[in-house]
Image: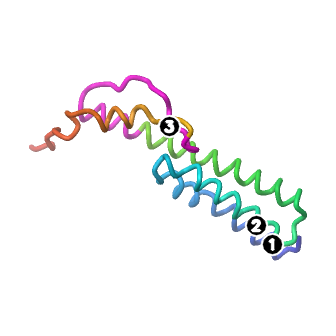
Amino acid sequence: MASGSEEVLDAAVAGIPEVARIISSLPLEDRASALSMAERSYLRTAKNLGGADDLAQRWASAVMYRLREQVEERVLAKSKLLTALYEELVGTPIAVGISESATGTTEDASAEIIEQDTHFGKVEPYRE
């Protein structure tokens, strides 16, 4: 691959945090397909830039590893933030449950508890 191709691949890698932000903000059931689409796009980009199939596949796999890692980190951080906010507002700790997977393979028990709690919608805003 030529140096212009390297610049394109470098730009794709530099864009991983933004792609991770977008995918992690999707509903749980949509993340697996979004990750699959991202992988196909990275692979197609590497192949279109003249990379051999095995080289393009290795590059796309490495990029996807970093992308999945960043999506998981964002999902975990969001889950921790929502749990802390819920516990502060309601005053009741959430039981430890199944953690949410970025790929959508398990359900997020804490989010389900928050959604089902009838007290959550009745919290009065703070007034001085």
Sequence-first disc among 2 and 3: 2
Instruction: Answer with the quarter of the image where residue 86 lies.
Output: top left
Q: Residue at x 24, y 27 (%)?
A: 91
Residue located beneath label 3 in the image? 100
Q: In the image, is residue 80 part of the stretch drawn in magenta? A: no
CA separation, marks 2 and 3?
Answer: 29 Å
- Element carrying mark 3: loop
Residue type at numbered disc 3: Glu
- Element carrying mark 1: helix
Q: Magenta residues?
A: 81-104
- Element carrying mark 2: helix
Q: Position of residue 31 (x, y in %)?
A: 54, 50
Give the position of the N terminus as an image quadrant: bottom right
Q: Are marks 1 and 2 in contact (CB under 8 Å)?
A: yes
Sequence-first disc among 1 and 3: 1
CA separation, marks 1 and 2?
Answer: 6 Å
Instruction: Answer with the quarter of the image where residue 104 lies.
Output: top right
Q: Residue at x 21, y 34 (%)?
A: 118
Q: Residue at x 48, y 46 (%)?
A: 28
Q: Position of residue 3 (x, y in %)?
A: 85, 74
Q: In the image, is residue 97 part of the stretch drawn in magenta? A: yes
Label drawn at residue 44: 2
